[in-house]
């Protein structure tokens, strides 16, 4: 079984980053999805696609995958740099552009 270990990005619906610190393990699909002819619903024989495992750190997720004998792939996310800003910087003397109304 193949799994993907990743750190999901922050949701656009919230301003906090608390859930972005967790690591997510998802199972890769092993069978194709099929369309049910009567209703048109899509279905799959693989129920592990619905399973999501959350871990506190990347090391915990890797240890779990190794203990269960799973082949894992780690997707690293880019860390964002936050530049501190202040409203007073708009009126600083060393500002490159002129301040106008």
Image (cartoon, rainbow, N blue to C red):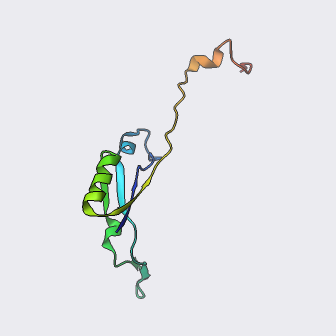
Residue at the image point whose x is 32% and y is 45% from the top: 57
**Image x and y of residue 71, in percent:** 36, 63
| Rendered image quadrant of residue 87 | top right
Q: Residue shown at 52%/34% (left/top)?
A: 81
Kindly give the residue lying farthest to the bottom in the view shown: 38
Give the quarter of the figure containing the N terminus.
Answer: bottom left
The percent position of residue 29, horizontal first and vertical second, equals 40, 71
Residue appearing at x 65%, y 15% in the figure:
91
Given residues 38 and 58, the one toward you in this image is 58
Q: Position of residue 79 (x, y in %)?
A: 49, 40
Identify the residue shown where x is 27% and y is 55%.
64
Image vertical order of residue 37 relative to residue 29, above or below: below
**How many numbered markers are drawn?**
0
Q: State the quadrant of the C terminus.
A: top right
Q: Is residue 56 left or right of residue 75?
A: left
When asked about the image quadrant of residue 30, the answer is bottom left
55 or 35: which is nearer to us? Answer: 55
Q: Give the vertical position of 86 relative to 49 (above or below).
A: above
Q: Is residue 94 rendered to the left or right of residue 85? A: right
Looking at the rendering, which quadrant does residue 85 occupy?
top right
Front residue of this view, candidates 73 and 80: 73
């Amino acid at each position: 079984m193949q799994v993907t270990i990743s750190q999901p990005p922050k949701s656009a619906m919230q301003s906090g980053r608390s859930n972005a610190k967790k690591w997510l393990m998802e199972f890769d699909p092993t069978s194709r999805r099929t369309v049910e002819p009567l209703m048109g619903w899509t279905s799959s024989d693989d129920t592990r696609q619905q399973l999501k495992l959350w871990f506190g750190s990347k090391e915990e997720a890797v240890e779990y995958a190794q203990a269960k004998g799973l082949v894992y792939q780690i997707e690293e996310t880019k860390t964002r740099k936050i530049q501190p800003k202040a409203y007073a910087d708009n009126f600083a003397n060393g500002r490159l552009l002129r301040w106008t109304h």
